[in-house]
Image: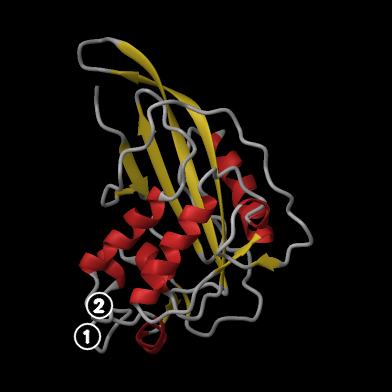
């Protein structure tokens, strides 16, 4: 049985002079790249979980269970949030709060992408995407995406003064958005779809794919060296 395949859509850099409200950009063609693999997903496709209330759209603080993390089908949203904040603390970035508005938007977009065979294409600034496919189908866990995105730290050069120009081509945009100091909110969603896999022997197996969407606010990856130096800080020791 083949291991799950994981892909992440490279985030787009934002203009250095960022507006107070981001414009709705045109969607670029999808260029998929393998991400450093997190722990393998669970082996069975799950049915949609009951989604939490999206509330008024105000962010809910992390650190608690259940109702606070609304707007999403991610069954492990708290685990995802805790993992993101552990990595951010390592890079001297303040903790993120969970936003039900961002989660609801991410969930809706994940469902849209799942209808397209989990095709990865960006729809918003401050957006990280990940695709997982496997036989049997993956479950709806989401926290593994955080580990995969953070793995891009291995390709980031903290010593160069040209922090954006010399790093962006290394496909580090998921990592940089994850630890972007100026971001304060996160919300994520997940959706799955059935997927047929044909092996070289000609045997056909029904598996599945899932797509994970996380959106951040304020969005990061502002395309300037100064912005990257100020918001993507080296890991602290200890």
Up/down of 224 relative to 88, above or below: below
Q: How crowded is the residue under tag 2: few (<14 C-alpha within 10 Å), some, or many (20+)?
A: few
Q: Residue furthest front?
A: 64
**Image coords of residue 79 (percent x, y):** 47, 54
Q: Is residue 228 above or below residue 107?
A: below
User: With 194 as the anchor, is 202 left or right in this view?
Assistant: left
Q: Nearer the viewer, mark 2 or mark 1?
A: 1
Q: Quadrant of residue 4?
A: top left
Task: Identify whether 136 is placed above or below 126.
Answer: above
Point out the image quarter for the C terminus: bottom left
Q: Which residue is mark 2?
A: 166
Q: Are marks 2 and 1 in contact (CB under 8 Å)?
A: yes
SS for tag 1? loop
Which residue is drawn at the image coordinates 34% and 24% (left, top)?
135
Q: Which residue is mark 1?
A: 160
Residue at image point 30% right, 48% down: 38
Q: Tell me the SS state at disc 2.
A: loop
- State whether residue 207 is above or below residue 13: above
């Amino acid at each position: 049985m083949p291991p799950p395949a994981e892909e992440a859509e490279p985030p787009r850099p934002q203009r250095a002079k960022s507006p107070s409200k981001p414009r709705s950009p045109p969607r670029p063609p999808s260029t998929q790249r393998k991400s450093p693999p997190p722990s393998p997903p669970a082996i069975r496709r799950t049915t949609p979980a009951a989604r939490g209330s999206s509330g008024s759209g105000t962010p809910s603080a992390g650190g608690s269970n259940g109702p606070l993390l609304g707007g999403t089908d991610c069954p492990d949203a708290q685990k995802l949030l805790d993992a993101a904040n552990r990595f951010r603390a390592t890079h001297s970035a303040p903790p993120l709060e969970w936003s039900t508005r961002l989660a609801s938007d991410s969930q809706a977009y994940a469902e849209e992408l799942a209808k397209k065979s989990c095709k990865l294409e960006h729809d918003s600034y401050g957006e990280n995407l990940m695709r997982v496919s496997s036989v049997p189908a993956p479950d709806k866990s989401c926290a593994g995406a955080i580990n995969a995105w953070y793995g891009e730290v291995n390709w980031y050069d903290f010593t160069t003064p040209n922090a954006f120009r010399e790093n962006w081509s290394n496909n580090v945009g998921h990592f940089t958005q994850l630890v972007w100091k100026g971001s304060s909110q996160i919300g994520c969603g997940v959706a799955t779809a059935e997927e047929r896999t044909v092996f070289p022997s000609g045997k056909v197996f029904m598996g599945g794919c899932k797509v994970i969407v996380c959106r951040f606010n304020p969005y990061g990856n502002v395309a300037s060296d100064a912005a990257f130096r100020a918001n993507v800080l080296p890991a602290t020791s200890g």
